[in-house]
Amino acid sequence: MTAQATAFFQANGFLVLEDALTGAEVNQLNQDATRLCRNESGAIAGLDPAPPEESDEAVLSRTLCIHFPHKLSQLMFDVLAQKNVVDVLTSVVSPNVKCMQSMLFIKAAGKPGQAWHQDEDYIPTRDRSLIGAWIALDDATIENGCLWIIPGSHRPGILWPQTWHGDQRFDCSEEAGGFPYTEKDEVPVEVKKGSVVFFNGYTLHRSLPNRSQGAFRRSLVNHYMSAESFLPWQRPDEKTSMAMADYRDIVMVAGVDPYPQRGTADIAKAFVRASGNGGCVSWKTQEKQEYVR
């Protein structure tokens, strides 16, 4: 990380690191992704077993996203602390960095995108240190549904209100709105496989559907934050206030844990996100497929 790259991230709320992973590393991750989708690496809630005769392509096409794949894949666990990724994190977050979530997006042709949102809406941090690392496992293009970002949208530090979008291009997640940006402000982030897109938890971003002819847009997205901050993702019990809640199903990827006395926990389990009918079980009624982390 150069001073110029750090300054770019601070100003724009995102940064692209090309060739962060080798072709061999990406191929191994894609092979593991196929094993996960075939239920060969352990039980995944909501994922139907794949018949042996069903092709890998057909199996992958049925799945939009697997949450917490690092719980079942050693390769995906190891990549949480991949050196090039950690170099960026320790430059823009803190010398002490923890990870709390991973998501494997398959996004076959025809699968929906996700409307405008900020990740801090879903993973709150007390010090605004949340950062996503979006690892491209295929070339990401406008045609197959790459990320779109509004540069600098993190700087106001505002979480914009979310409402139901009613747009079948997107999954069931609500859409952020009311912000002072237009289509002229958004930029597509087309990257080659092996690249990593880092973005601030307050940065507005979205993706559109995969409109390619049969191409996948696979990506592995991991979320990190400073280890100094509590993570009030959920209350551990009724006696603990949200102000003191600190979700401890974490993986330290750099530095030291300032709260070793709190220990760690194995809470989250792998589950698959619903992907039919625009990402919902019933798109018209906004019925979502939900599982406890």
Image (spheres, helix red, strand yellow):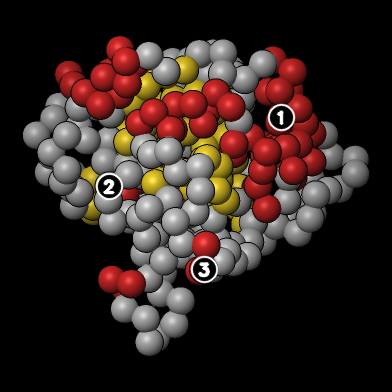
Label 2 packing within 10 angstroms: few (<14), some (14-19), many (20+): some
Q: Looking at the picture, which amino acid does disc 3 mark?
A: Gln
Left or right: 31 as drawn, with respect to 230: right
What x and y, as percent, mark residue 254? Answer: 52, 40
Q: Nearer the viewer, residue 27 or 13?
A: 13
Q: Badge 1, how many Cα within 10 Å: few under 14, some, many 20+?
A: some
Disc 1 residue type?
A: Asn
Reply above or below: 262 against 96: below
Q: What's the distance in space between the residues labelled 2 and 1, CA to CA?
A: 32 Å
Q: Are marks 1 and 3 in contact (CB under 8 Å)?
A: no
Residue matched to label 1: 30
Q: Report whether residue 276 is seen.
A: no
Of the image marks 1 and 3, the number of the one nearer the N terminus: 1
* Image quadrant in which the N terminus is located: top left
Q: In this rendered view, identify the residue nearer to me: 107 or 148.
A: 148
Residue 223: x and y, percent?
Answer: 47, 43
Q: Is residue 82 visible?
A: yes
SS of the residue under disc 2: loop
> Closer to us: mark 1 or mark 3?
3
Identify the secondary structure beneath mark 3. Answer: helix
Image disc number at residue 261: 3
Judging depth in this view, the residue of 35 and 28 nearest the camera is 28
